[in-house]
Image (tube, rainbow, N blue to C red):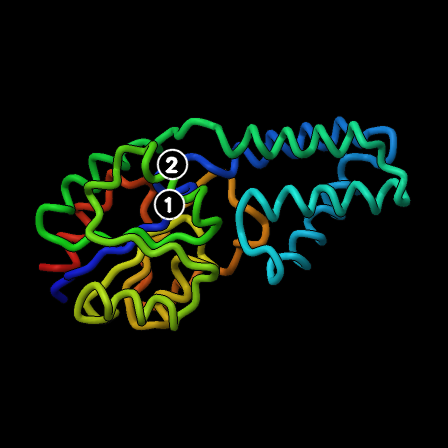
Amino acid sequence: MNLQTIGFDADDTLWQNEQFFRLTQDRFADLLADYAVRDHLMDRLLAAERRNIGHYGFGIKGFVLSMIETAIEVTDRTVPAPVIAEILAAGQDMLSHPIHLLPHAQEALEALAERHRLVLITKGDLLDQDRKLAQSGLGDLFDAVEIVSQKTSAVYARAFASHGDGPGRAMMVGNSLKSDVIPAIEAGATGVYVPHHLTWELEHAPLPVANPRFHEIPDLSYLPALVAQISS
């Protein structure tokens, strides 16, 4: 197999992301401590996020709206205005948080960019993802950037056809089995799973270990060797 195009997820594959959501959830739990215990509150928040994905998409803005909706629910519509203000402030803090690259991300991209076409394929809010890419310092290493509302096999088939010879000569690398790996494999590409110690519950899925196009590596330092092995 002669790999031509390598797609990369962004959040929690190239840079930290979920940890800031977890910190904000802690802040949210403190704000609503008088109305709900933490576990119950987190269950209600996750349910709101699941309901709202179709309306707000993925990202910080939808997360903030889900927190506000949850606050209204658990307080029986009596949530104080200062609590709403604190939730909004928490979201603004997330939108301005500096980027922290994950170990080996830049080195792996630099090594692979010499012989392959690199495409960033990420979902979320357009402005926020553009901001993070610009601050990461990795933008010049990508031949193309795709910011999508959802990651499906059809999205990967189109992206790899637009930026190469199709999924048959493409690889997708990411920390989410549900969004990065499984749909890319379904499209005909190779899927590489790079686990992150924090992964949003809605991104969990069973490992497709029986599929010959599935690979798992501990971190991105292993990726250049894997690409060379597959291409040999």
The quarter holding residue 83 reads top right
- Kindly state the secondary structure of the residue where label 1 is placed: loop
Q: Is residue 75 left or right of residue 119?
A: right
Q: Position of residue 14 (x, y in %)?
A: 34, 40
Give the mark nearer the N terminus: 1 vs 2. 1
Q: Amino acid at mark 1?
A: Ala
Between 126 and 100, the one lying in front of the other is: 126
The residue lying at 56 percent from left, 28 percent from top is 93
Q: Is residue 177 left or right of residue 190?
A: right
The N terminus - image quarter: bottom left
The quarter holding residue 67 reads top right
Residue on which disc 2 sits: 15
User: Dot 2, how many residues are within 10 Å of its Cα: few (below 14), some (14-19), or many (20+)?
Assistant: some
Q: Amino acid at mark 2?
A: Trp
The residue lying at 82 percent from left, 44 percent from top is 72
Relative to residue 149, is residue 142 depicted above or below? Answer: above
Label 1 with label 2: CB-CB less than 8 Å:
yes
Q: Position of residue 50 (x, y in %)?
A: 65, 57
Between 159 and 232, the one lying in front of the other is: 159
- Kindly state the secondary structure of the residue where label 2 is placed: loop
The C terminus - image quarter: bottom left
**CA–CA distance in space, label 1 to label 2:** 7 Å
